[in-house]
């Protein structure tokens, strides 16, 4: 088994490397973490990244379903049947899969019961499709609507959140369950505690070097030094 510390973000080649015991620690998206478990790779999260919203930590994220407030015919999940919905893509956890699960629980199957329009990244494009009239509704991850409002790119009063939910301590617009974001996972063969500490410190240093990322991330949360 490898002993060298190896750090990788979520990428197409990671899954094969995990199956061949080539990685010790992986910073991965929440959806990829679920996929790893489904394929019997028993990764264990030793910490999760916490986003920052106006200086306040946001330890989880979810999805938002919304339309223009002027659309009097769309008020509930049921009303989304046969509508055109702007999504990032079907692989996006916060920009499609979370919302699709909420609809499925109401008996609405995507993409069969509505027309989905894939806009790609960045997620702002899904909002642009809604505002231009290309789509009747849109899916994005939590925090984006508020961020665009602060940047004067969007007036939140124009939007109606569908299936609004409230979570204790969660102040962002929300339509789905919430999930922890970006777990740092340790493989069963990973080195012990001190190496795990090096892992999250190294990844934090890498994140802080990216333009604008220092404002996005608020730190780590959880058992960040207990990989052994």
Image (spheres, rainbow, N blue to C red):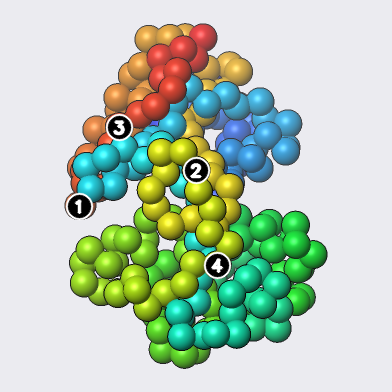
Q: Secondary structure at mark 4?
A: strand
Instruction: Locate residue 143, reporting x and y percent.
Output: 37, 55
Residue 16 visible at all:
no
Q: Earlier in the sequence, mark 2 or mark 4?
A: 4
Residue with the mark numbered 2 = 167
Mark found first going from the N terminus, 2 or 3: 2
- The foreground one among 41 and 68 is 68
Q: Residue at x 46, y 80 (%)?
A: 68
For label 3, the residue is 219
Q: Quadrant of residue 27?
A: top left
Q: What is the crowding at mark 2: few (fewer than 14 residues within 10 Å), some, or many (at least 20)? A: few
Q: CA distance from mark 4 to mark 1?
A: 33 Å
N-term-proximal mark, 4 vs 3 = 4
Q: Position of residue 133 (x, y in %)?
A: 47, 90
Q: Residue at x 20, y 52 (%)?
A: 211
Q: In the depicted view, which residue is nearer to us: 163 or 135?
A: 163
Residue at the spot of label 1: 211
Mark pair 4, 3: CA separation: 31 Å
From the image, tell me which residue sits under label 4. 162
Say which label, 1 or 3, has the lower sequence index: 1
Q: Position of residue 48 (x, y in %)?
A: 43, 32
Task: Judge by depth and name the residue closer to the eye, 95 or 151.
Answer: 151
Left or right: where 196 falls relative to 100: left
Look at the image and tell me in which quarter the N terminus lies: top right
**Number of the front mark, 4 or 1:** 4
Q: Nearer the viewer, mark 1 or mark 3?
A: 3
């Amino acid at each position: 088994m490898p002993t060298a510390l190896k750090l990788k973000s979520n990428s197409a080649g990671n899954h094969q490397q995990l199956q061949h015991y080539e990685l010790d620690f992986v910073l991965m998206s929440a959806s990829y973490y679920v996929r790893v478990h489904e394929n019997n790779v028993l990764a264990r999260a030793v910490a999760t990244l916490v986003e920052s919203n106006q200086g306040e930590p946001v330890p989880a994220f979810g999805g938002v379903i919304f339309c223009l407030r002027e659309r009097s015919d769309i008020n509930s999940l049921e009303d989304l049947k046969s509508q055109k919905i702007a999504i990032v893509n079907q692989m996006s956890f916060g920009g499609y899969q979370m919302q699709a699960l909420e609809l499925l629980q109401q008996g609405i199957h995507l993409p069969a019961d509505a027309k989905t329009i894939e806009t790609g990244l960045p997620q702002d494009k899904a909002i642009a499709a809604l505002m231009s009239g290309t789509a009747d509704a849109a899916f994005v991850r939590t925090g984006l609507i508020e961020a665009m409002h602060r940047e004067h790119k969007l007036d939140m009063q124009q939007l109606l959140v569908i299936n609004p939910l409230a979570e204790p301590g969660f102040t962002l617009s929300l339509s789905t369950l919430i999930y922890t974001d970006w777990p740092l996972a340790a493989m069963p063969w990973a080195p012990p505690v001190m190496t795990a500490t090096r892992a999250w410190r190294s990844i934090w240093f890498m994140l802080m070097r990216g333009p604008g990322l220092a404002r996005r991330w608020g730190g780590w949360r959880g058992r960040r030094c207990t990989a052994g």
